[in-house]
């Protein structure tokens, strides 16, 4: 979940690396550090966030260096446990993303050989293993050292007197950026966009020598060539562009993201599979899981294809007896639970497809085929535009399988989302911000919207919130309803309308204030609820989209009024690369 950045070029390395680390902040971390190679190896590392100005980095010499943002797995966050870690001599420095599972036995072995350990991390063994192997050739030393490692890693290493960064990858993401007389390495694309659009995605087992002129890759002792790919994201995508938070910027990008994804995403791989075997299993986590649930409603209603949606974290340990196609949804393409579920599906010989936002990500290499959303880089930890982009793919898919029945929704949704973004949610925020707990309820495809609304509220405002199928509330949670427990009710014309109105009356009878979300001009709903928020959209599919955006806005503005750290909520990280 942390990030690594390496730079070999002609500019001063440390400030550039620190800037790159800032771009990776959204992945979540607890400490950071940099090492550069000038005449000597210099290391600067600290617990906590990267300060807005870091004069120490400007004082570091050298145009070759490595940096790290840590998300501690072994050893508490502290200055000493922060990366880079060095060997006994201080002439070799290493940053590492991942977990070394056999570190305890390696540490004992190295300790017996006289190595002195300064930190409690699993990572430090790597620096000492390289020291053991080092005879002036860093590449050979890293190649030798990783043979002893079990676990997951993306490693960058530097050594005094060596003009290369040596990288190694096993089950942790690593991308190389090829610039003009400068080469970068990072955990994801965001730090590279400023410098180049030409990238190489490293593969498991790769050992890479990085110089200003480029990268030489070895795998299994042999030199290998990896394709150079062109990235279609740009540096401005990872800047706030005048918005107070990335999350708000990303919410406002949704009309464009929907429009572009609906028109350009190519659902062909899944389309062909579903025409052959009309049944689908979806595996995903968090917001992607909610997108999967809405996808299920769309495919079942418009294409009559039965769909089951599984939490990826559960699927791996109780694999259902399916043989049909499996779709894995993950924004980052690196979500560990989803990757494991996908491997479990492959072991059952299910055809697999990935739905992801990130080209070159691990899921695209594991699945038989990939469909890409066109959301661009998503920096806010709370997913917004990637969710809408995933829904755009489901709409396009259901439309193709359902003989064009969704053409109107596909054509209009971006306009309706644009209208929704003009909505004033001030009164609603006043109703929600003081709550100890909030229920979100809906029926049919609005039930996953309720789940997503509650998830957004929890993540960024820290108010406890639960999404419920509206009919389930009286089977237990009614006991919790009080005047301090507002309910957000999604109530739209359709088969569930009447029963929703009754449900809302039942909730009001228990004293809960109700915020109703429905279509403009719905006087009946307006009269039964305490506060009514209309959303645009001529049909239920578009209403699902606009109400999804509305619940994002409710969470955002509530969190803002409570002054939480919206883009980096406590305890969370953007891409969850541990199980
Ligand atoms: N396992 C290492 C540590 O705890 C690296 C964690 C990370 O990926 O940030 O220091």
Image: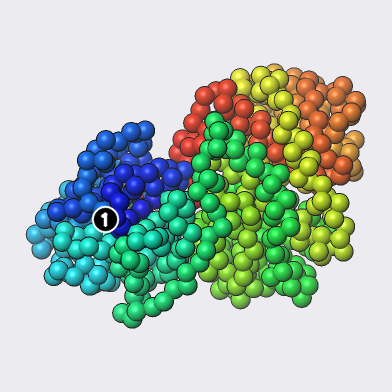
What's the residue at 60%, 35% (across, down)? 248
What's the residue at 26%, 55% (across, down)? 64
Residue 106 x/y as whole percent: 22, 62
Residue 358 as seen in the image, left or right of residue 225: right
Residue 64 as seen in the image, left or right of residue 276: left
For label 1, the crowd category at 10 Å Cα-Cα, with few meaning under 14, some 14 to 19 and many 20 or more, is many
Residue 536 x/y as whole percent: 82, 36
Please give the count of numbered marks on the rendered protein. Answer: 1
Q: Does 339 sit above or below residue 526? A: below
Q: Does 557 sit above or below residue 537? A: above
Can you identify the residue that label 1 sits on? 64
What's the residue at 71%, 34% (across, down)? 421
Residue 294 x/y as whole percent: 73, 51
Residue 361 as seen in the image, left or right of residue 222: right
Along the line of sight, which residue is nearer the eye, 161 or 455? 161
Along the line of sight, which residue is nearer the eye, 385 or 103? 385
Q: In which quarter of the image is residue 181?
A: bottom left
Q: Does 298 sit above or below residue 253? A: below
Residue 543 x/y as whole percent: 80, 41
């Amino acid at each position: 979940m942390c990030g690594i950045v390496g730079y070999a070029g002609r500019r001063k390395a440390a400030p550039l690396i620190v800037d790159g680390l800032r771009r990776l902040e959204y992945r979540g971390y607890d400490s950071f550090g940099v090492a550069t190679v000038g005449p000597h190896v210099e290391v600067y590392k600290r617990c906590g966030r990267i300060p807005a100005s870091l004069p120490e980095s400007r004082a570091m010499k050298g145009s070759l260096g490595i940096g790290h943002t840590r998300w501690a797995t072994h050893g508490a966050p502290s200055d000493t446990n922060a990366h880079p870690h060095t060997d006994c001599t201080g002439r070799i420095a290493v940053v590492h993303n991942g977990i070394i599972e056999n570190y305890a036995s390696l540490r004992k072995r190295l300790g017996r050989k006289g190595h002195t350990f300064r930190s409690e991390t699993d990572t430090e063994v790597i620096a000492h293993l390289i020291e053991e192997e080092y005879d002036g050739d860093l590449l050979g030393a890293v190649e030798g050292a990783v043979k002893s490692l079990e676990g997951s890693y993306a490693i960058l290493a530097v050594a005094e007197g060596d003009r290369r960064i040596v990288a190694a990858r096993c089950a942790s993401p690593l991308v190389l950026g090829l610039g003009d007389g400068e080469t970068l390495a990072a955990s994801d694309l965001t730090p590279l966009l400023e410098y180049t659009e030409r990238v190489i995605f490293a593969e498991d087992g790769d050992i890479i020598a990085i110089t200003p002129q480029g990268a030489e890759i070895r795998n299994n002792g042999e030199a290998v060539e990896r394709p150079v790919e062109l990235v279609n994201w740009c540096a401005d995508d990872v800047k706030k562009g005048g918005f107070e938070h990335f999350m708000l910027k990303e919410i406002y990008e949704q009309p464009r993201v929907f429009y572009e994804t609906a028109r350009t995403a190519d659902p062909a791989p899944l389309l062909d599979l579903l025409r052959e075997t009309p049944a689908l299993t979806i595996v995903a986590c968090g917001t992607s899981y909610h997108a999967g649930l809405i996808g299920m409603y769309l495919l079942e209603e418009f294409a009559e294809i039965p769909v089951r949606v599984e939490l990826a974290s559960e699927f791996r340990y109780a694999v259902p007896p399916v043989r049909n196609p499996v779709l894995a949804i993950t924004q980052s393409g690196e979500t560990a639970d989803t990757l494991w579920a996908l491997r479990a599906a492959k072991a059952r010989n299910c055809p697999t497809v990935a739905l992801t936002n990130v080209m070159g990500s691990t899921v695209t290499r594991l699945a038989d085929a990939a469909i890409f959303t066109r959301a661009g880089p998503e920096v806010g930890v709370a997913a917004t535009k990637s969710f809408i982009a995933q829904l755009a793919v489901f709409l396009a898919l259901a439309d193709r399988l359902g003989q064009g029945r969704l053409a109107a929704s596909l054509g209009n949704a971006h306009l309706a989302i644009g209208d929704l973004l003009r909505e004033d949610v001030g009164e609603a925020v006043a109703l929600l911000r003081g709550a100890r707990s909030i229920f979100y309820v809906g029926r049919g495809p609005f039930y996953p919207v309720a789940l997503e609304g509650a998830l957004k509220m929890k993540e960024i405002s820290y108010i406890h919130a639960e999404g419920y199928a509206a009919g389930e509330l009286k089977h237990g949670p009614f006991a919790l309803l009080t005047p301090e427990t507002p309910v957000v009710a999604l109530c739209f014309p359709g088969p569930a309308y009447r029963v929703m109105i009754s449900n809302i009356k039942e909730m009001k009878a228990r004293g809960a204030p109700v915020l109703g979300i429905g279509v403009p001009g719905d006087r009946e709903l307006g009269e039964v609820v305490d506060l009514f928020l209309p959303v645009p959209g001529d049909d239920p599919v578009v209403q699902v989209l606009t109400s999804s955006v509305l619940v994002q806005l409710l969470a955002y503005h509530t969190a803002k009024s409570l002054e939480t750290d919206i883009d980096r909520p406590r305890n969370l990280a953007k891409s969850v690369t541990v199980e």
